[in-house]
Image (tube, grey):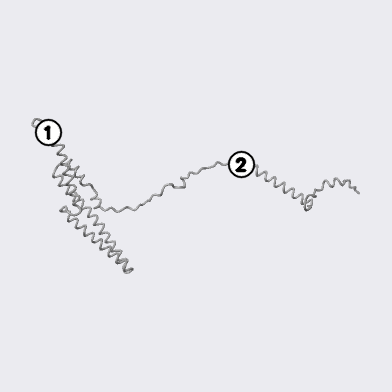
Amino acid sequence: MRINTWSPCVKNAMRPDTSNTIFPISKTKYLAMSLFNLFRRSKQDVINQVTDTAPSEPVITVDRQLFVEEEAPELKNPAKKSVNPIEVFLDQNFEWQGYNDGYSHPDTDYLVNKLKILRSEFRLAVDKCMDARRTEVGDLKLHLIQTNGISPRLEAQLNEKLRQVEVTIHELDIQKILSAEDEGMVSTAIHSYRLGFIRGLERYQQEKLFAGSTGLFNQ
């Protein structure tokens, strides 16, 4: 028979102190908690070590212009504004043109031919406007046929628009006839050019013909 030689002091030293705990724990539970704490500390140490030794990635700066357009977008196919050929013709400074031509070409034949050219340019502008109005008449008539019977009010509006365009065509035709006598809308351009030509001719005569003395012995 083995005699237990352990003293009560040694037994008390091997036993965990549970005097300060609210609830006494068993030896097996105490060892399990100790292993869990040890494992958690070891895992945290490994994470900290990896974090400290991992190389820091460089900060990449992205240019704002790659994604943001500071300027307003441009219209790829902007609507073209319709131009009235008659207005383009009448907006010219005919008096200034006549002045330059009268000074540079002090000749009656030049004046007559230039006036013919101006009349021809005006008639060409009128023809362009008439062609545009005739095209508009054709479009209105076709639209009137396609929408016939849908709405009496809309049909009346189309008929009124059609009547106005036809009146415009008639007025343009009258302007072509009047231009043969330098009357109508072309009259302003013709008279302004002739007045400027006369002034340019007078300037030419003053500088080239009347500038010198008329003395008998002057060279």
Element under label 1? loop
Left or right position of 141 against 198 = right
User: In the rendered structure, are the residues bearing label 2 and label 1 in contact, judged by CB atoms less than 8 Å apart?
Assistant: no
Label 2: state its secondary structure.
loop
Work out whether residue 214 or residue 71 is closer to the camera in this orientation and state it: 214
Q: Earlier in the sequence, mark 2 or mark 1?
A: 2
The residue sitting at 9% across, 30% down in the picture is: 217
Dot 1 alpha-carbon crowd within 10 angstroms: few under 14, some 14 to 19, many 20 or more? few
Q: Which mark is residue 54?
A: 2
Residue 58: % across, % down: 55, 41
Tell which residue pokes out farthest to the left in this image.
216
Q: Residue visible at 72% across and 47% down?
A: 37
* Foreground residue among 120 and 55: 120
Residue matched to label 1:
213
Spatial separation of the CA atoms under disc 2 and disc 1: 104 Å
Q: Amino acid at mark 2?
A: Ala
Q: Nearer the viewer, residue 88 or 35?
A: 88
Q: Position of residue 57 (x, y in %)?
A: 57, 42
**Percent of width and height locating residue 138:** 27, 61
* Quarter of the image with the C terminus in it: top left
Going by the numbered disc 1, the residue's amino acid type is Ser
At horizontal 47% and vertical 45% (from top left) the residue drawn is 64
The quadrant where residue 108 appears: top left
**Quarter of the image holding residue 162?**
bottom left
Q: Quick check: 150 above or below 128?
A: below
Total numbered labels: 2
Q: Is residue 196 above or below residue 137?
A: above
* Residue placed most toward the observer, 203 or 105: 203
Dot label at residue 9: none
Q: Nearer the viewer, mark 2 or mark 1?
A: 1
Q: Residue at x 58, y 41 (%)?
A: 56
State the image coordinates of residue 159 (x, y, percent, origin top left): 27, 65
